[in-house]
Image (cartoon, grey):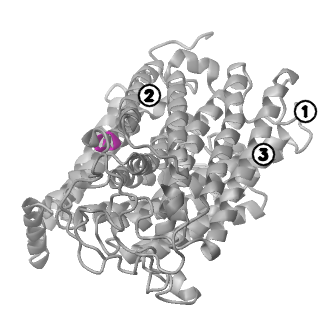
Amino acid sequence: MQTEVVKGNEEAVPGNGLDRENYINAKHGIWSWLLTTDHKRIAILYLVSITLMFFMGGAFAAGVRLELMTPKGDLVDSDAYNKLFTMHGIVMVFFFLIPSIPAVLGNFLLPIMIGAKDLAFPKINLLSWYFYIVGVAVFLVACLFGGVETGWTFYTPYSTAFSHTNVILAALGIFIAGFSSILTGLNFIVTIHKMRAPGLTWFRLPLFVWAHYATSLIQILGTPVVAVTILMVAVERLLKLGLFDPALGGDPILFQHLFWFYSHPAVYIMILPGMGVMSELITAFTRKRVFGYEFIAISSLAIAVVGFLVWGHHMFVSGQSTYAGMVFSALSFLVAIPSAVKVFNWSATLYKGSVSWESPMMYAIGFIGLFTIGGLTGLFLAAMGLDIHMHDTYFVVAHFHYIMVGGAIFAYLGGIHFWWPKITGRLYPEYWARVAAVLVFAGFNLTFFPQFVVGYLGMPRRYHAYPEEFQVLNVLSTAGASLLGIAYLIPMVYLTWSLFAGKKAPANPWGAKGLEWTIQSPPTTFNFDHQPVVTEEAYAYAEGHDTSHDAAPPAAPVRA
Amino acid sequence: MTDHAAAADHAEAHEHAHPHIVPVRTYILVFLALMVGTAITVGASYVDFGHSYLNNLVALLIAFTKATLVVLFFMHVKYSSKVTQLAVGSGFAFLVILFFFTFADYLTRGWLGTPGS
């Protein structure tokens, strides 16, 4: 059904706004972008900046994988290797994954999905992007001065007493970027509370909005703690206060408590918005009401709250009390419940649905499988006894990449493809998108599955040399990384191409439900010509009825 | 939006139009209470309660009480809407989580001997 839409009429596409006024052509010039308060333009600013950071983080990863092709440390020395994996981690976590879905798709879609003309605080939204850019700039300066090699976790006492690299500068960059995250979260919470369209009750909200609400709670409650922690590291380095130094009455493990209090929930900042995207994709491509709406909505909040109670599972072998470890272990198992609720409900939504295999759906199906593997291996690591064997091995590296790449990045790519016609008013070539999705899936698994094996066999993370018996698995992993790298470049090429030569998109190319599909593509500056009124629940697909040829959903209350 | 939510919005808008005026006397009383709290903190630091964690507990309880006074009166949370109170309350609740589990580690860390020592 999609191919017909892709081949749609070039001259007159109903619902396409490229030849009319839209948010892209409303104003011109560089300052109209740099000083914009339009949530959609700010989303584009974020999209461009995080894409640059993604490829920078990818370049560091390429260095790591190339070094690990051979058992000997022959491409780079150990110091340079330490910097490569540290900067890969910092860039990917703080400058790509955390802003990725909320700042790009959330910024663009959240106000539209709730029928508002912008976020509650448009200027603060712009400020958040500037915080992000200044944070990135400070971090880049740290890179120019030689980078940092503490690991993205900045563990003390190494970061405070021994490292001679740019710890303070790199930490300052993260500190500043943290404010961008807090402001985005604040904006989303206020917007969701105060600006919902008439008729849009809490339990009619798209699940994308629920997921962003839960994410925002974590951003607001957690980020200040890591900001303070990073400041403590800086103060300790400069003034030798002894906060983390046992000789002066401090405790290095205190750093780990404070750091993981944020950084474990930060994993949910990365994955929860992805789960929100997933609910939209699964329903749109099964043309079916989501199974167990309330459970998926509330499970987002449950993940956000329970996620704050589990941080000690990163510290089983740190010297933390065994009793605290037991409690953290048991609580960690609890997170599996709301996560499984989501996975089972998405799978149940597929059942007897009118499933179609457009490229966003391919990413969504990939997400379900990969997130499940990532989540279940997390349970291995949450078990105290097993963790002693697997802590700090490649098993851990594989586990969290299944969550962050197999989960978060798959959802991000799926979401970018799904909403690309809405964002740009252009359709991308579906054939190439499917090729890329298959290659990303294959490249990803070839990269990270061997790491489970090599980690279980005992290869530690963060070393640039390893015993020869591990070489085959490492070569497989590096080969997979090359494939994955190429697979990431393909969407860059065809999405950029589509901006200029892609077919014009109608208002609702997927026949999907949701207020964003009732307005023109790309939207006007204030999204809606009239205040929409919501009269139905989310995902009210008429089951058995193929809506893909409807210009707008039949029950859409107001047509912009 | 439900009637309920609309009513709540109306109440908040009403509140904005007429901000609650706190008498100066209240501010002075709170300030004095904070000063007394500071004095007690200093005094308590000279008393040995037997275990270092008991001393910490006393100091933290006084600090917690003082912070509550600041939040309620100086930050006007006592006179704010329910949503604001909920937001402040959750911030506090999560701080308690941070302290609770971290201190649980410190309290129980010595309960098992270190192997080999």
Foreground residue, A37 or A417? A417
Q: Is residue A405 left or right of residue A288?
A: right
**Mark 1 — residue?**
A72
Q: CA distance from mark 2 to mark 1?
A: 42 Å
Question: CA–CA distance between discs 2 and 3?
Answer: 46 Å
Say which quarter of the image contains residue A305: top left
At horizontal 83% and vertical 26% (from top left) the residue drawn is: A472
For the residue marked with disc 2, what is the amino acid?
Answer: Tyr
Q: Chain of mark 1?
A: A
The residue depicted at 8 percent of the width and 74 percent of the height is B14
Asked if marks 3 and 1 fall on the same chain, the answer is: yes
Residue named by callout 2:
B106
Residue B48 located left or right of residue A401: left
Q: In the rendered view, does A532 fall on the left or right side of B98?
A: left
Residue drawn 63% across the image and 55% down it: A431
Disc nearest the viewer among 2 and 1 = 1
Residue behind mark 3: A482
What is the CA distance from the residue labelled 3 to the residue labelled 1?
A: 20 Å
The location of residue A94, given as percent across then percent down, is: 57, 54
Marks 2/3 same chain: no
